Image (cartoon, rainbow, N blue to C red):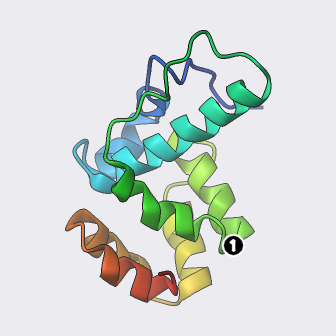
């Protein structure tokens, strides 16, 4: 059984632990990949903080702007299946396409491609309009 990789969220990004096939699917400079890595890094940071495991007062090691995280932070709470896919596929724990499948199961056929295109263009208003966010 695979387990979630551990890393120090104050000194490195979850991106370094992502499956290379997953990263290459979207491209290494992808807003989606970087925001998803930051979402993961933030989750690990919060877990470390809650368990008094932080080594210093440093914040989480993030690679994108906070504004890029907002569309992902919004959708992660819309569906348990989508949340699970977003936390498994990047590490190779779910088959390729799990995020897209769960996204479209939640928001409708064809919605992932439109949402992803808007996210990559940083058109967050379109992202939120497609997912019912603000």
Image position, residue 111 (x, y; %): 42, 84
Neighbours of disc 1 within 10 Å: few (<14), some (14-19), many (20+):
some
For label 1, the residue is 79
Residue at 48% across, 89% down: 109
Q: Which residue is drawn at 45% across and 41% down?
A: 37
Q: Tell me if I can see residue 110 in this picture.
A: no
- Of helix, strand and loop, which one carries label 1? loop
Expressed as whole percent of the image width and height from the top left, the position of residue 129 reads 41, 88
In the image, taking residue 37 as reference, residue 99 lies left or right, namely right
Quarter of image, res 42: top right
Q: Can you tell which quarter of the image residue 51 is in?
A: top right
Residue 53, relative to residue 118: is it above or below?
above
The answer to which of 101 and 81 lies nearer the viewer is 81
Q: In which quarter of the image is the N terminus?
A: top right
Q: Which residue lies furthest to the top in this view?
A: 55
Residue 43 appears in the picture as rendered: yes
Relative horizontal placement of residue 81, taking residue 67 as reference (left or right): right
With respect to residue 97, does 39 lie above or below?
Answer: above
Q: Which residue is drawn at 43% across and 55% down?
A: 69
Count of marks overlaid on the render: 1
Give the vertical position of 67 relative to 123 (above or below).
Answer: above
Q: Residue furthest front?
A: 57
Q: Residue placed at 33% from the left, 70% from the top?
A: 116
56, 82: nearer the viewer: 56
Report the side of 80 relative to 108 (left or right).
right
> Where is residue 103 drawn, in percent x and y?
54, 74
Res 40 → quadrant: top right
| Position in image of residue 79 (x %, y %) | 69, 72
């Amino acid at each position: 059984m695979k387990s979630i990789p551990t890393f120090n969220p104050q000194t490195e990004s979850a991106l370094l632990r992502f499956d290379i096939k997953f990263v290459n699917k979207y491209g290494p400079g992808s807003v989606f990949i970087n925001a998803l890595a930051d979402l993961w890094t933030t989750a690990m940071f919060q877990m470390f903080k809650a368990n008094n495991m932080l080594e210093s007062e440093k914040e989480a090691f993030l690679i994108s702007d906070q504004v890029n995280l907002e569309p992902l932070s919004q959708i992660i709470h819309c569906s348990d299946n989508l949340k699970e896919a977003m936390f498994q596929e990047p590490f190779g724990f779910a088959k390729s396409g799990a995020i897209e499948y769960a996204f479209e199961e939640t928001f409708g056929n064809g919605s992932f491609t439109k949402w992803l295109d808007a996210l990559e263009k940083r058109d967050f208003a379109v992202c939120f309009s497609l997912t019912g966010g603000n």
